[in-house]
Image: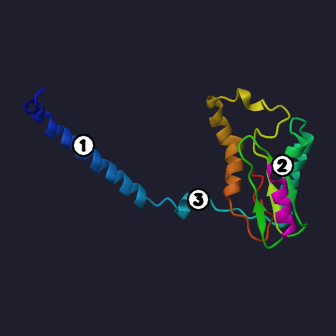
Amino acid sequence: MTALALRPFVRPLLITAADLLALLLLAVVALYLWPLDNDRLRPAARQLSYADAQARITAAVDRQKADPTILPECRSQALLHGGATAKAVLLLHGYHDCPVQYRDLAQRFYKLGYNVYVPLAPLHGNVDPHTDADVRASSWPTMRRSRWTSWRRSARRPASSASPAAACWPPT
């Protein structure tokens, strides 16, 4: 093809490219201006008393102690001073890990006067490391609506400074 034969196609191609660029620019501006950090989008934080939070944490740990499929070293860890402290720490372990990952760090924070809680994530810390081997993408929506979402939401909720690390853990 010659340069003369290509000219009729150049103008529509440039117009299409300009339209796509304008659409992309509009999307970027819209996302930049969209109120992503709006208080109406967040549920209200639920505060628990220290005693209620400690009871929930103790119940979660007791359930894990009674479950023979969970490794003893992978149970949730709660290092509480027996009363409210000025500061608290919530440590969340990584994928395919368990609370033992933070044993030393949790002890360090505890010695500094913090109440510390390291919860066990769903499907982690099992005696059989292949427990989640049969988990398929199709089962994620069910898990997402149940345990994982509850665990993730509880980690996002702010705990008051006078409560243990997981003032809202475990969720109801």
Dot 2, how many residues are within 10 Å of its Cα: few (below 14), some (14-19), or many (20+)? some
Residue assigned mark 1: 17
Residue assigned mark 2: 100
Which quarter of the picture shows residue 78?
bottom right
From the viewer's perspective, is the residue at label 2 or at label 3 nearer?
2
Would residue 167 be visible to someone looking at this image?
no
* Disc 2 secondary structure class: helix
Q: Is residue 12 left or right of residue 170?
A: left
**What's under tag 1, amino acid-wise?**
Ala
**What's under tag 3, amino acid-wise?**
Arg
103 is within the stretch colored magenta: yes
- Say above or below: 22 vs 53: above
- Tell me the quarter of the image containing the N terminus: top left
Would residue 31 be visible to someone looking at this image?
yes
Q: Is residue 5 left or right of residue 169?
A: left
152 is within the stretch colored magenta: no
Give the magenta range. Answer: 100-113
